[in-house]
Image (cartoon, rainbow, N blue to C red):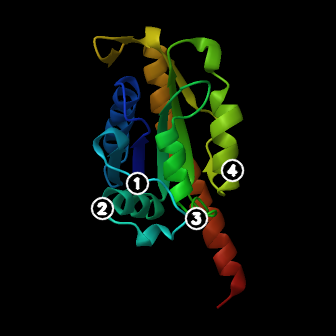
C-alpha cells in the first residue's frame, strides 16, 4: 500500500501538524506501507494550464506523479473563505479527470471555528467524487481550540485521526478484494 499525505496549504501550521500526526500513525500502524508527505507550503507549483500532468516540470511534476502513483491519499485542507485553498484546487486541476480511480481518499479538515464543518461535504467531496475517488465517509474536522503550542491537545481529535487512518487502510484492503474479484471474473 502506497500512502501519500497532502498538507494542502501554503500558509499556517495547523493542517501540517494534523497531517504529520496522521502520517506518523500510518507509519506506526502499517509499517509495510510506503509513505510520502507532500507539504504544498514547501513546493513551487505552477498553475494548471491543461497539459498532461507528465508534461510539467519540477515540483509540479513531482506532486502530480506522486499523487498518481499512490494507492491511498489522505488530504489535509484548511478552510479558507468557506472552501478549500486555491493551491489545493490547483493540484486537482493538474490531474486528469479520473485521477483518483481505484484510489482511496481520507480527509482531514482544519478551521478556526466550527462554522465551516460542512466545507468538506459541500466543496471537497464533490471534487473527489468527480475524479472517481473511493472516499472514506467519515472525515476529521479539527478546530483552532484543539491545538495548543503547535500540538493537538484534544484526545477526541487524536482518537478520530487514528480511526481515520484505520478506516482508510481497511477501505483500501476491501477495495483490493473487490478489484481482484472483478479481475478474476474475466478468466484470462
Mark 4 lies on residue: 129
Q: Which label was assigned to residue 96?
A: 3
Nearer-N-terminus badge (4/3): 3
**Which residue is denoted by mark 1 in the rendering?**
46
Question: Residue 96: horizontal and vertical position, in percent?
Answer: 58, 64
Numbered disc 2: secondary structure: helix
Dot 1 crowding, Cα within 10 Å, few <14, some 14–19, many 20+: some
Query: Which callout, 2 or 4, points at the residue further toward the start of the chain?
Result: 2
State how far apart marks 4 and 3 are (Cα): 13 Å
Q: Is residue 161 visible?
A: yes
Of marks 1 and 4, the one in the foreground: 1
- Is residue 172 left or right of 117 when viewed as pictured? left
Whichever of labels 1 and 4 marks the residue nearer the N terminus, that label is 1
Mark 4 Cα shell of 10 Å, populated few (<14), some (14-19), many (≥20):
some
Q: Are marks 2 and 1 in contact (CB under 8 Å)?
A: yes
Which residue: 36% across, 36% down?
25
Q: Is residue 167 visible?
A: no
Sequence-first disc among 2 and 3: 2
Amino acid at each position: 500500500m502506497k500512502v501519500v499525505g497532502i498538507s494542502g496549504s501554503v500558509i499556517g501550521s495547523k493542517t501540517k501538524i494534523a497531517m504529520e500526526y496522521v502520517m506518523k500513525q500510518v507509519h506506526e500502524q502499517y509499517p509495510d506501507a510506503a509513505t510520502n508527505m507532500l507539504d504544498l507550503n514547501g513546493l513551487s507549483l505552477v498553475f494548471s494550464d491543461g497539459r498532461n500532468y507528465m508534461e510539467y516540470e519540477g515540483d509540479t511534476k513531482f506532486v502530480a506523479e506522486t499523487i498518481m502513483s499512490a494507492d491511498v491519499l489522505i488530504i489535509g485542507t484548511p478552510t479558507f473563505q468557506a472552501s478549500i485553498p486555491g493551491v489545493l484546487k490547483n493540484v486537482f486541476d493538474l490531474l486528469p479527470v479520473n485521477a483518483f480511480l481505484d484510489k482511496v481518499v481520507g480527509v482531514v479538515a482544519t478551521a478556526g471555528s466550527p462554522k465551516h464543518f460542512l466545507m468538506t461535504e459541500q466543496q471537497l467531496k464533490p471534487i473527489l467524487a468527480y475524479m472517481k475517488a473511493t472516499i472514506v465517509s467519515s472525515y476529521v474536522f479539527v478546530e483552532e481550540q484543539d491545538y495548543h503550542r503547535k500540538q493537538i491537545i484534544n484526545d477526541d481529535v487524536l482518537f478520530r485521526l487514528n480511526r481515520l487512518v484505520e478506516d482508510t487502510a481497511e477501505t483500501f484492503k476491501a477495495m483490493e478484494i473487490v478489484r481482484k474479484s472483478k479481475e478474476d471474473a474475466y478468466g484470462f
